[in-house]
Amino acid sequence: MDVKKSKAKQRKFKSMPIIAGLGLCLLAGLTWYVSINAGATTIKRNDMLFGTVKKGDLQVEIEGYGALRSDRQLLITSLTRATVQEIILKPGALVTPESIIVQLANPELQQLVDSAEQELSQRKANLRQLKLNQQRELLNETASYAEMEASYETAKVRLEAQSGLVKSGIVSALDYKESVVHEAQLKKRLNIHQQRTDALKLVNQEAINIQLEQIKQQQGQLDIAQNRLDRLSVKAGFSGVLQRLSVELGQSLAAGQEIALIGSVQDLIALVRVPQSKAQQIFIGQEAIVDTRRDKIIGRVSRIDPVVVENTVEVEIALPDKLPNSARPQLSVDAIIITDTLTDVTYIERPVNGKANSNTRLFLLDESNDYAMRTEVEFGKEMGRYIEIIKGGKVNDTFIVSDLSKLKKSELTIENF
């Protein structure tokens, strides 16, 4: 019995090193598992956005949003007090210069036109009466002149006859002298009458001119009244589109009140707003691409508004004369302004919180793409969707560009499901 106990104890001592080794392996594995789970967080690949570092030429772009506007606009206002009688066209309608948009009503204008027409007719009648009176007066003067001219011719003949007889004593010297005086008087009276007739003609013509001037003034008043009456039929004024209608049916309008806004269809510009922080990079003449959702139009920056509204600046983009059919006034558009072209730069899709000329920490994937570690990255210029990498990344490196700023861990494990 003593021999058997000794063998059992020997087998027990021989198995203890094996058990101790297994325990140490289990402890090491548990330690590794705990360390891995303590320093890394597991995320799903489908929930993340990734960006790969590339190298090449890129354009520095600034994105903006806005709308197309007519470069040529016409604001139509009421010329006088009136009431909206009929609305013929509504916003969005294409118009020509003679297109009637709104019909207004004002009975006082019609009465004013009627009164002006009557006054004009009366002045024209007065002119005709004046001409008749002048013609009658001139005929009387002409008849009187003819009688005086006949008397002068008779006296002249008598004087010529007596001039030969006075020498022979047939006609006395006294009668001859009387004939000479009479002929001279008639000649003077005839000259005076002729001057009076010429003066009468000038006076008559001046009277006619005065009447004509009064008729012209009255015609002008009638034209003004008629124009104001015609303006009750509100016309577009030029070819374009009705952009805004500011009146309602039955509304009473005051003189100078806005009725409608007409804008050209072809002469369009783009007014877009860009962030204030990027406005200093924009200069007049830079190329811009305006996106109408159907077409892309190449334009040029023509004006930069100095006023800042809600941290944005308005930029005006001049567009070419020939535009696609999708371009129309008031259309909402997106725009990209090209401010510079960078050559041979290292870049990546801009992370959610990535800003130009700043440092940030991004998660860089290892070669297996299953593990990521937070890495310091220095950014340069921003180029629309992309941003320049100055330091911290090389070509073909893959970073997580999703927003992980709230994540405390510096390492990530990426699952494929």
Image (spheres, rainbow, N blue to C red):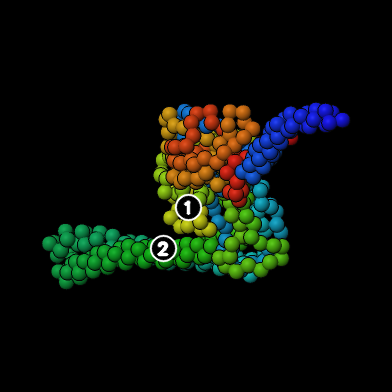
Q: Which of 373 and 95 is in front in this view?
A: 373
Lateral position of residue 201 relative to residue 21, left or right: left
Q: Nearer the viewer, residue 131 or 105?
A: 105
Q: How dense is the environment of label 1, judged by Cα within 10 Å: few (below 14), some, or many (20 and up)?
A: some
**Res 395 visible:** yes
Q: Which of 394 and 243 is in front in this view?
A: 394
Q: Nearer the viewer, residue 248 or 195?
A: 248
Sooner in the amino-acid sequence: mark 1 or mark 2: 2
The label on residue 276 is: 1
At x 36%, y 66%, the residue is: 203
Label 1 is placed on what type of residue? Gln
Query: Which quarter of the figure is the C terminus placed in?
Result: top right
At x 56%, y 36%, the residue is: 364
Give how far across and how far down residue 247 sits, in percent: 66, 62
Label 2 is placed on what type of residue? Asn
Residue designated by label 2 = 209
Q: How far apart are marks 1 and 2 (CA)?
A: 69 Å
At x 47%, y 52%, the residue is: 276
Q: How dense is the environment of label 2, judged by Cα within 10 Å: few (below 14), some, or many (20 and up)?
A: few
At x 66%, y 68%, the residue is: 252
**Res 416 visible:** no
Give how far across and how far down residue 396 sits, in percent: 53, 28
Instruction: Identify the element where label 1 is drawn.
Output: helix
Give how far across and how far down residue 4 sits, in percent: 84, 28
